[in-house]
Image (cartoon, rainbow, N blue to C red):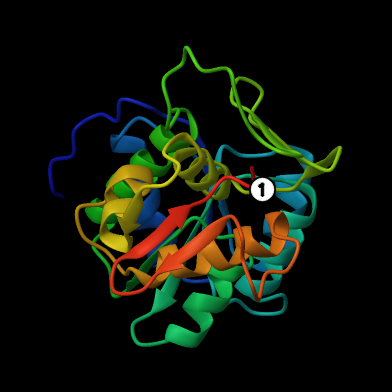
Amino acid sequence: MEELPKADVTGRVLVVDDDLTVRDVVRRYLELAGHQVELAGDGEEALRMAAEREPDLVVLDLMLPGVDGLEVCRRLRERSAVPVIMLTARGDEEDRVLGLSLGADDYVSKPFSARELALRVSSVLRRVGSRPVPAATPALADGTLRLDLTARRAERDGGELTLTGREFDLLAFLMAHPGRAYSRADLLAEVWGWEFGDQSTVTVHVRRLREKIEADPAAPARIATVWGVGYRYDPSG
């Protein structure tokens, strides 16, 4: 087995896959990195375990018997912002994009390196516990849109927004740097901590944010597309 350094941020990870061999290999690598691991073989079992005791992160295979991974992700998102890393078959771009649109934080394509997956788990947990702006800034506000960075709470027009951890981090980063255009590669590096990766991940998260913070998502006023570059946050004022 490849040597794996201890993660600087560890947590309870629920691994959901119907393949016993995959579950066992992933468990061993995650435990080597210092994580506590629980295993589920299907979607119903995963939902039950998550309801009984919410994990810090879920590694979720999309191809599950009974309740598939996309439905599990959707149900998790209805009640929780727990980070989700999807396991997808290589080339299944439609399912991958749909999973990201349902609120998954990251994905790893099969066949995958268990070592890479363990590093991705540590990266997501690290990002969930970090802040994309200086800690001295307790809140960000733009008109009726407000982010409480300490409580990680988002509000618009007086009502609370349901944001995933990654959506919150992306919005906070953009609001903290108004008027500056960032490429999707820039945002992957700044918010996801990835030096490389599928840039459609950023596109999907921007689309989801627009649906939640824009008066008209089809004609966004806050998160503007800068053609040939990427995205820019324009304060409403």
Q: Nearer the viewer, residue 42 or 76?
A: 76
Residue at 74% x, 48% y: name it: 162
Quarter holding the C terminus? Answer: top right
Question: Is 197 placed left or right of 139 in the picture?
Answer: left
Q: What residue occupies the far front of the structure in this picture?
A: 237
Question: Is 85 placed left or right of 209 in the picture?
Answer: left
The residue where tag 1 is placed is: 163
Residue at 30% x, 35% y: name it: 33
Q: Please state the horizontal and vertical placement of residue 234, each as a whole percent of the image.
A: 52, 50
Q: What residue occupies the far top of the structure in this picture?
A: 136
Residue 161 shows in the view: yes
Residue at 35% x, 30% y: name it: 34
Question: Is 39 placed left or right of 187 in the picture?
Answer: right
Residue at 33% x, 62% y: name it: 184
Question: Is 211 placed left or right of 130 in the picture?
Answer: right
- Label 1: which secondary element: loop
Q: Give the answer, above or below, for where 221 lies relative to 88.
A: above
Residue 29 shows in the view: no
Q: Nearer the viewer, residue 116 or 212?
A: 212
Q: Nearer the viewer, residue 79 or 182?
A: 182
* Amino acid type indicated by mark 1: Leu
Q: Please state the horizontal and vertical placement of residue 91, each as a whole percent of the image.
A: 35, 87
Q: What residue occupies the far right of the structure in this picture?
A: 158
Q: Nearer the viewer, residue 52 or 106?
A: 106
Number of numbered discs: 1
Q: Please state the horizontal and vertical placement of residue 4, each as a whole percent of the image.
A: 18, 39
Q: Please state the horizontal and vertical placement of residue 157, each as a whole percent of the image.
A: 84, 43
